[in-house]
Amino acid sequence: MLQPASDFDTLKSRFRWSLPSVYNIADAVSDTWAESDPTRLAIRQVLQDGSFNDWSHRDLNLAANRLANVFKAKGVKAGDRIALLLPQIPQTAVAHIAAYKLGAIAVPMAALFGVEALSYRLTDSGACALVTDTAGLEKLSAIRDQLPNLELVISIDGPETGVFGYDVLLEAASDRFETLRTSPDDPALMIYTSGTTGQPKGVLHGHRVLAGHMPGIELSQDFLGQPGDLLWTPADWAWAGGLLNALFPALSLGVPVISHATRKFDPEFAFHLLEKHKVQNAFIPPTALKMLRAVNSPASRFKLDWRSVGSAGESLGQETYDWFAKEFGFPVNEFYGQTECNAVLGSAAALGVTRSGAIGKPTPGHEVAVIDEDGQVLAPETLGQIAIKRPDPVMFLEYWKKPEATRDKFIGDWMITGDQGIVDEDGYVHFIGRDDDIITSAGYRIGPGEIEDCLIKHPSIALAAAIGKPDPLRTEIVKAYVVLKTDEEGDDTLEKDIRNFVRERLSAHEYPREIEFVDALPMTTTGKVIRRKLRDQALAEV
């Protein structure tokens, strides 16, 4: 934990990384608490009808021990990839912890993924095991014969043909398991993130990724770990935001976490949940915060006990920052990072580090700067690329099986983010925009390549390009420019069909919310789509 300090500069100057030679995420989030305070609340699962189930650290740890024994008995070993296709439920945490205990690599996947998105990730990761539910099995059924590495499938909803039942397996397994003594650099977690071209890349992290997150997340919650703290996030635990900005840091500090599985964010319900369970801390991505504004007079209608709210994943913006501070009497702590290197910039209202329109200052333990194309640090108020210096515990190990992409992520010792920004005279970093084709929508980073690959599989489409169009709620929406095959005619019916085609194959956050039929796409002489021209065209429509 961060040591208390009276001001931010003192806090930073005192901070030193001190990672032990043996470090395992399972020990940090589960084993330690199960031994020292077994009845302590770990997860409160809120069900659809409003009732809830409480899981103690002992409950969580024993279940993880049983599942780790199941994995081991079925032949899963250290270094193997275990895919997790589950919503925000306690069993998701159990599966993560079990994988880490074994020394395996957890590969979380969003429940909203479609068949093609799952097929690519399961194939690319070489996952040998999958823990899922009935909804996941339905998607898996269409592709399982294409996944020769996937030998073990477990469903939390019970056994089916070729599928083991989670409860049956756990009942028969021992609740004793010795967590593997891993090093901080041993691989633990792989999260897929989109790039500007081609398919998503597996971002491989070591066990140290959790330790690396702690300073930034503690600050974003105004020193998380105070008496009475209880944290909730609407962010999917399959996303780095839900997992590493909320679930794991909270559990490692002994702070209980609310889980609630839902496919759609409901702002009215969110305030009821915050009130009923006396939630003190929340990680709420900017899009969800903007949606909360639609609720009439929430501060007077609901008796809220929250004391801190962190937000990241996209730019919060001055308007939402100012609204929240005025409505609730304290500011949102905006922070910044990427799946590859997260929580490296941040705010801490408790120490007076907060500024409307800024994404924060470098958090303790991280060296962040705005640099030029040669890796030189730029003077204040000069536009350049936000970059993080290695070595850094929160930084990824590599892109899975992509050494060239890993190499290209760095200029010297600076990991480049692809985000343009400036540093003001007071040291606050301001996000200006992306310098590539990544689309940022509702906190998700969406690469156009995967969408375009899917679009051209539609029988009516000859060519397609996807870009991000500015949107007041989601930051950007996906807009597709489509060239149809000869004799095809674009109309509302075809537009709806194309949307559904992408939604079903990729995911509900990647489908194009706008489609424009065009005769041709702007191309370079080498045949590459000039997305910049399309972005400029979309911007002119706003």
Image: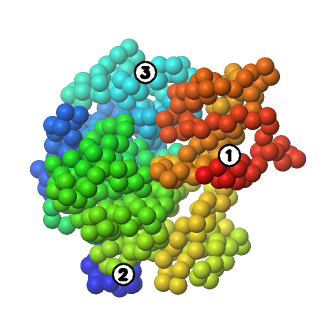
Three-letter amino acid code at the position of disc 2: Phe
The percent position of residue 534, horizontal first and vertical second, equals 71, 48
Residue 58, above or below 511: below
The percent position of residue 165, horizontal first and vertical second, equals 30, 23
- Please name the residue shown 35% across and 42% down the image: 265
Three-letter amino acid code at the position of disc 3: Glu
Give the residue pinned by disc 1. Answer: 197
CA gap between label 3 and label 2 equals 50 Å
Of callouts 3 and 1, the N-terminal one:
3
- Please name the residue shown 26% across and 69% down the image: 329
Left or right: where does residue 501 sit relative to residue 28? right
Q: Quadrant of the N terminus?
A: bottom left
- Please name the residue shown 74% across and 51% down the image: 533
Res 480 visible: yes
Residue 507, above or below 253: above
The local secondary structure at tag 1 comes to loop
Give the residue pinned by disc 2. Answer: 8
Of callouts 3 and 2, the N-terminal one:
2
Q: Are marks 1 and 2 in contact (CB under 8 Å)?
A: no
Of callouts 1 and 2, the N-terminal one:
2
Q: Nearer the viewer, residue 436 or 179?
A: 436
Res 244 visible: no
Q: Residues within 10 Å of mark 1 (few under 14, many from 20)?
A: few
Left or right: where does residue 534 sit relative to residue 214? right
The local secondary structure at tag 3 comes to helix
Q: Are marks 3 and 1 in contact (CB under 8 Å)?
A: no
Q: Nearer the viewer, residue 128 or 493?
A: 493
The local secondary structure at tag 2 comes to helix
Give the residue pinned by disc 3. Answer: 138
